[in-house]
Image: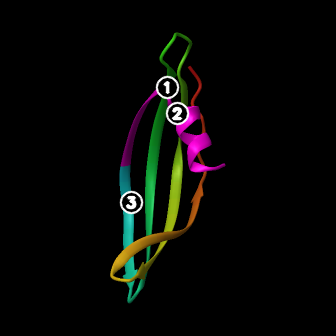
Amino acid sequence: MTAAKMQQALANVDIDASNAIQEIRVFGDWAYCWNHLTIAVTPQHGGAPVKRSGHVLSVLQKQNGRWVIVRDANLLTVVPD
């Protein structure tokens, strides 16, 4: 999905998210971060929110002095009402 399509898709929803960092490890120019993420996406013009929750693992690499996510895996599943 392009950035423009992503912005269009998110234009009419409200997003509420929270995370709890479980672990961060740094190995030179490489690192990983393990989180538990909870997210709710609610249509602005009515409708029930879609809620998902689960673990996320992000692998980062230092590039030109900045940390960049190079791989990201999530196990978010639908949270029942």
Give the secondary structure at mark 2.
Answer: helix
Query: Which residue is at the front of the view, 53 or 2?
Result: 2
Labelled pair 1, 2 in contact (Cβ < 8 Å): yes
**Compared with residue 46, is residue 32 higher up or lower down, i.e. above or below?**
below
- Colouring convention used in this rendered image of the protein: rainbow
Asked if residue 8 can be seen in this view, the reply is yes
Task: Mark 3 vs mark 2: give the one in front.
Answer: 2
Q: Amino acid at mark 1?
A: Val
Q: Which residue is mark 2?
A: 10
Look at the picture and state if 1 lies above or below 78. Answer: below
Position of residue 33 measured from the top left corner of the image (x, y, whole percent): 43, 66
| Secondary-structure class at tag 1 | strand
Residue 52 in sight: no
> Along the line of sight, which residue is nearer the eye, 15 or 66?
66
Q: Position of residue 74 (x, y in %)?
A: 58, 54
Q: Which residues are magenta?
A: 1-19
Residue indicated by mark 1: 13
Secondary structure of residue under mark 3: strand
- What residue sits 37% from the left and 80% below the top? 26
In the picture of the structure, the residue carrying the numbered disc 3 is 22
Q: Nearer the viewer, mark 1 or mark 3?
A: 1
The three-letter code of the residue at mark 2 reads Leu
Q: Position of residue 70 (x, y in %)?
A: 54, 71
Mark 3 vs 2, N-terminal side: 2
